[in-house]
Image (spheres, rainbow, N blue to C red):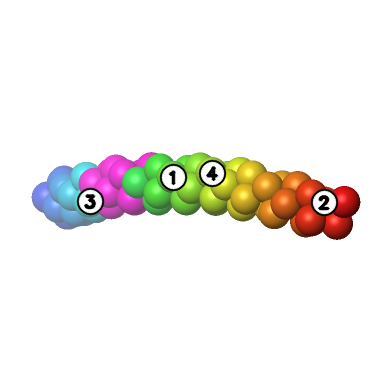
Amino acid sequence: SQADFQAERSELLNRQEQLNADYEALSTLINETNDIIEQYNNNVAASNKLYDTVNSRVNQSDNSISE
């Protein structure tokens, strides 16, 4: 009947709205996670650069002592 159709349609529309809201929330979490990963990767790169700088200075000092 028409009433059954409208009731089912209403349920489906409500479910669609909930799925859209869930999708938006998930997209936000994914974007936040990607930002955190990017910050982490930048920190790792900076740490590696500092490590390389310190390591090269230690190697230079070792060479000076040997000479």
The kind of secondary structure the magenta stretch mainly shows is helix
* Whether label 2 touches label 3, CB < 8 Å: no
Residue 2 placement, left or right of 66: left
For the residue marked with disc 1, what is the amino acid?
Answer: Gln
Residue 3 in the image, given as x and y percentages of width and height: 12, 50
Residue 51 in the image, given as x and y percentages of width and height: 61, 52
- In primary-sequence order, the first of circles 2 and 4 is 4
> Which one is in front, 9 or 29?
29
Circle 2 SS class: helix
For label 1, the residue is 39
For the residue marked with disc 4, what is the amino acid?
Answer: Ala
Cα separation between marks 1 and 2: 36 Å
Q: What residue span does the magenta drawing correspond to?
A: 20-31
> Which one is in front, 47 or 63?
63
For the residue marked with disc 3, what is the amino acid?
Answer: Gln
- In primary-sequence order, the first of circles 2 and 3 is 3
- Numbered label attached to residue 46: 4
Cα separation between marks 3 and 1: 32 Å
Q: Can the viewer see residue 37 in this picture?
A: no
